[in-house]
Image: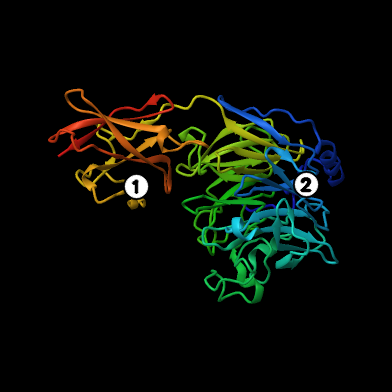
Amino acid sequence: MARKCGNRDAGVFTIWPRTLVSGATALLLFVLTAYLPATAATLPAGFSETQIASGLSKPTAMEIAPDGRVFVCLQGGQLRVIKNGSLLSTPFLSLTVDSNGERGLLGITFDPNFPTNNFVYVYYTVPGDPAHNRVSRFTANGDVALAGSEFVVVDLDNLGGAGNHNGGAIHFGPDGKLYIAVGENDSPSNSQTLSNRLGKVLRINANGSIPSDNPFFNTATGANRSIWAMGLRNPFTFAFQPGSGRLFINDVGGSVQEEINEGVAGSNYGWPFCEGACPPGNPSFRDPLFQYAHGTTSTQGCAIVGGGFYNPANAQFPSSYFGKYFFGDLCNGWIRLFDPSTNTATDFATGISLPVDIKVANDGSLYYLAIGSASVFRVQFTGQLPPPALLMETVGDSAVALDSVTLIRDPFPLTNTFNFSSDNRTRVMLFATNLRLGPGEGPSSVTARAEDAQLNLYPLTVEYVGALPGVNAFTEVVVALPGNLPSGQSVLVSLTWHAQTTNKARIRIN
């Protein structure tokens, strides 16, 4: 199915299809809805939300600092800070921007070494004739930017007369490089050429230089060697998965489909030749992992916005959420949950007034930013978690475990070998679900015991390791078995956390 170019401004600020209303009416609708009273979203049982900031004028994007502060971009050029649950009165930064259409202050990220260098990066539209987008670095001085600290990392291509399709998301990848999502400025032909950087994802070094291992480094010239992927319309948001480094790119569609794309170096995602999956047999284009149609039902929409993997350092949601990807739709006001293992999506939240960004915090909370209510909301799990459970073989009650005596099964990429000591005989690595330490908790929060065939109980020393890299649903726990356990038989091991005891998993003692 060929894409229908130019039928819709699917960006953040002109929010309704041109086929439904005129441009002037769309702008009026935006003005009327931009400051609607905040209403509670409809969430699954066990979840609740808190409005942590309001009165944000035309917010476009947000990012959570390593220390927990939430930084919010406003289209007009201010970067605001939410600290300890309160919106600070003094902006971190106030830039002079071109805010026409979908232009303005559109993206923010933090340097991987932010705790030591205090570097903050932003994406914004520089006024001029013609205007252009820019990525600059500023140095934080507490809750404000250090005066005169702007360092221009990269100036992007001059923009045409259209004010839409600017992209704007910026994030550091696990390789330490800065990735930049750039829209095609409502000129579809830009997406299929290496002669400009519009309609692309770019990859550069933190200082603005271009890595020589970029996929088009030897085929493009000059600044265009920063192109990492192409064939995109308006990649307004994207996200890297902690641990795996997997990249998902949300590309806002034209008049047919919205896309979640797998970010792969050198890929061409097909715009403007196809929207959603391309016709079969075309090896030139990479099809989306997931797409949804335009419309008004609970699974349809008009503009995909926000994205965050649920792989936080301290998870609070049930384990069924681990490794999933949250994404939202601007027009229909929902957040859904994408499962990368099946490439399917399920409902999560509805009734949100024009969401534009979604983030997962290190403490396991989900944040979303809504233009319609000019607010940031925090979603937390307040229900009862399912009891923790030790992972066992599909048939039988033997533990999925690893030690130097009996190797029962090892299906995981075990990288925490430092947990083994010289006393290898007594150390066993176990795997559990729904067991994740919360803020303020330590390894002593988890206890363990073994039970022999005579029903004697033995307390075990516990080393809490944490989430398995790349298999976030499972928690690794190492237990030290006492030397007085009887040999030549099995013992049943269980863990207790928050007054809940797991199933009993069998371990053979030679």
Q: Is residue 204 above or below residue 455?
A: below
Q: Which mark is in front, 1 or 2?
A: 1
- Binning the other alpha carbons within 10 Å of mark 2 as few (below 14), some (14 to 19) or many (20 upward) gives many
Side of 55 where 180 appears, left or right: left
Q: Is residue 301 above or below residue 206?
A: above
Can I make out residue 8 in this image? Answer: no
Q: Residue furthest left?
A: 488
- Check if mark 1's residue and mark 2's residue have beta carbons within 8 Å: no
The residue that disc 1 covers is 412
Can I make out residue 478 in this image? Answer: yes
Q: Is residue 15 above or below residue 415?
A: above
Disc 1 from disc 2: Cα separation: 45 Å
Q: Amino acid at mark 1?
A: Phe
- The residue lying toward the viewer, choosing from 453 and 124, is 453
Tell me what residue is drawn at x 57 percent, y 33 percent: 347
- The residue lying toward the viewer, choosing from 282 and 471, is 471
The residue that disc 2 covers is 13
The disc at residue 491 is none
> Residue 367 placed where, x, y %?
63, 39
Q: Amino acid at mark 2?
A: Phe
Tell me what residue is drawn at x 66 percent, y 62 percent: 191
Which badge, 1 or 2, comes first in the chain's sequence? 2
> Residue 355 placed where, x, y %?
70, 40
